[in-house]
Image (cartoon, rainbow, N blue to C red):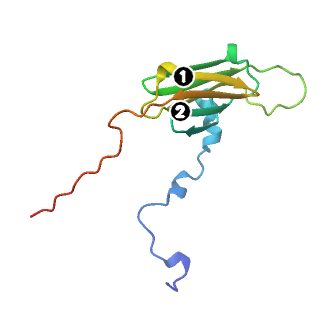
Amino acid sequence: MTKLPEHYRQRSLWPEMSDLLAGLPSWANLRPAFGSHVIRVEDELKDDSYELRAEVPGVDPAKDVDVTVRDGVLTIKAERSEKKEANGRSEFSYGSFVRSVTLPAGADEDAIKASYDKGILTVSVPVTQAAGAAEKHVEIQAAS
């Protein structure tokens, strides 16, 4: 441990990451710049299915929610309209919301089901264990 005062200690030629980012806006403040909000999700991979729960309260799932799958990526899009009020404050998020997740290997994209209950969208995806998908150990040869 050095006994030199802080201002005499040798510093790296490269600045600390926190110094580089100082003064920049936080990621939370940049969200509106991207035009959409992120949907919060929980997911779980069970023996034969993948289940994703997405938090999308205050929407009509028949009109305002779209679930698509393409090339192994599940995408959820939702739209929440703003109700105009003359006085008062609102901390609710309005606008478009989107979230994409990569499905696990063996996901059956043709058998995906979705349901909506009390603000939670649940998407269930059957997953089959493909033949030969088991872990394979590779023998290591010693160099001579």
Mark 1 lies on residue:
112
State the residue in front, 69 or 36: 69
Question: Residue 47 location in percent, x, y?
Answer: 51, 38
Q: Could you say which quadrant of the image residue 27 lies in?
A: top right
Residue at left 74%, top 28%? 119
Question: Residue 123 location in percent, x, y?
Answer: 60, 27
Mark 2 burial class by Cα count in 10 Å: few <14, some 14-19, many 20+:
some
Question: Residue 81 location in percent, x, y?
Answer: 74, 19
Residue at left 58%, top 46%? 24
Mark 2: secondary structure: strand
Closer to the camera: disc 2 or disc 1?
Answer: 2
Question: Residue 122 location in percent, x, y?
Answer: 64, 28
Q: Amino acid at mark 1?
A: Ile
Q: Amino acid at mark 2?
A: Ser
Image side of residue 119 versus residue 104, left or right: right
Looking at marks 2 and 1 on the same chain, the residue that comes earlier in the sequence is marked by: 2
Quick one: which residue is furthest to the left in this view?
A: 144
Q: Could you say which quadrant of the image residue 142 lies in?
A: bottom left
Mark 2 lies on residue:
49
State the residue in front, 137 or 30: 137
Quick one: which residue is furthest to the right in this view?
A: 87
In this view, 7 is above or below 84: below
Mark 1: secondary structure: loop
